[in-house]
Image (cartoon, grey):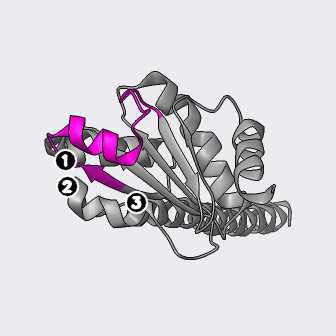
Amino acid sequence: MILAKNNNITLTTRYLSLAFFIVLCISCKNKTTKVETTNSQNIALNKEIPVYDFKTLEPLLYTESNTTYIVNFWAMWCAPCVKELPYIQHYAKTYPDTEILLISLDFKEDIDTKLKPFLENKNITSKVILLDDPDANTWIDKIDPNWSGAIPFTIIFNAEKRAFYERSFESFEDLENEVTNTIHKS
């Protein structure tokens, strides 16, 4: 009688342990799948980074619409550029009607080995293109004759208003205020 009771307890304990293990595996599997999906989405957004010369880029710096555009010239090796990228990314998420374009001035040969991993690591999902045009003295002056060529450099514009910023934004609020002052105030 005692032996049968112990066998039932042992059998019940085994079933409970097995059920607990199955539930644990299922819940862990769902969490893992969610993380993999999120990482896959981030990778896919900047999977292909186009390389432009200035002639190809120039039309993107103008618009005839009332959409607000933020175009930011930056590079991975520029500490102030890297510091402000999260503010720009946060702005893109907060104001999804604003078009964001990040123009990387990094080396074309570093796209796959350095730039893409950098963007993934920093969770940068805004559109990125790489500008590869050796005649910087010409295209810098075409963008803004007052631009020294230092980065970060940002253009905030729509069809009627345009402002240039040869500085880094110190916070999300700093960027938000400049967009408001440029676009939304008379």
181 or 77: nearer the eye? 181
How far is the residue under mark 2 from the one under mark 3?
A: 24 Å
66 or 90: nearer the eye? 66
Amino acid type at image mark 2:
Asp
Instruction: Estimate the x, y position of residue 19 in percent, counting from the top left.
Output: 70, 69
In the orientation shown, which residue stands out farthest toward the bottom?
65
Sequence order check, earlier mark of 2 and 1:
2
- The residue beneath circle 2 is 53
- The residue beneath circle 3 is 43
Instruction: Estimate the x, y position of residue 127 in percent, counting from the top left.
Output: 44, 60
Magenta-colored span: 129-152
Q: Is residue 8 above or below residue 175?
A: below
How far is the residue under mark 2 from the one under mark 1?
A: 5 Å
Amino acid type at image mark 3:
Ile
Amino acid type at image mark 1:
Asp
Q: Is residue 93 left or right of residue 155?
A: right
Q: Is residue 16 left or right of residue 130?
A: right
* Mark sitting on residue 132: 1
> In what element is the residue under mark 2?
loop
Q: Is residue 63 magenta?
A: no
